[in-house]
Amino acid sequence: MKLPDKTECIRVIIRCRPLSETEMKDGREVAVKMIKDTGEVLVQKLNDEIPKIFTFDSVYDWNSEQENIFTETAYPIIDNVLQGYNGTIFAYG
C-alpha cells in the first residue's frame, strides 16, 4: 500500500497477534479472522453464526512479517517526514 502523495489523512492499521501459549493450553480458539485484501476483521464468537465485521485501511494477521508491515505502513510516513511534511505514527499494544 502506498501512502497518497502529500495528502493529509488518518489511516488505521490493525495487526492481530497469535494466541499465547497460555491461551492455547486453556483450549481457547481464534475468534478473529483477518481479510488482508479487503481490510476487514471478522469477529465471531464460537456460538454466533453471524460475525461482526470491521473495516480498516490495512489489516495484518499473526503470520505477517514485521519488516513487511514497516515497509508498507511506517516507511512512507517517515519518507514524507524527511521531505518536510508532518507525520505521526501512533502504535498501541
Image (cartoon, rainbow, N blue to C red):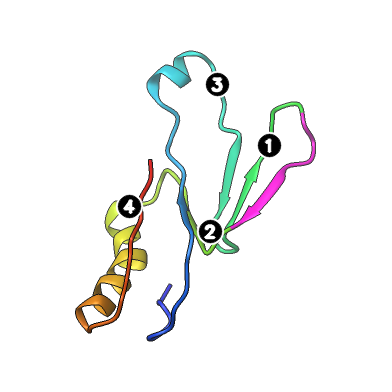
Name above or below for residue 47 compared with residue 82. Answer: above
Residue 36 numbered mark, or none: 2
What is the residue that sits farthest to the front in this orientation?
86
Label 2, label 3: how many angstroms apart (C-alpha)? 23 Å
Quadrant assignment for the C terminus: top left
How many numbered badges does the structure rendering display? Answer: 4
Label 2, label 4: how many angstroms apart (C-alpha)? 13 Å
Name above or below for residue 39 compared with residue 7. Answer: above
Label 1, label 4: how many angstroms apart (C-alpha)? 25 Å
Q: Is residue 78 left or right of residue 69?
A: left
SS at badge 1: loop
SS at badge 2: loop
SS at badge 4: loop
Residue at horizontal 46%, vertical 20%? Answer: 24
Q: CB of mark 1 within 8 Å of CB of mark 3?
A: no
Label 1 crowd (10 A; few <14 / some 14-19 / many >=20)? some
Q: CB of mark 2 within 8 Å of CB of mark 3?
A: no
Q: CB of mark 1 within 8 Å of CB of mark 4?
A: no
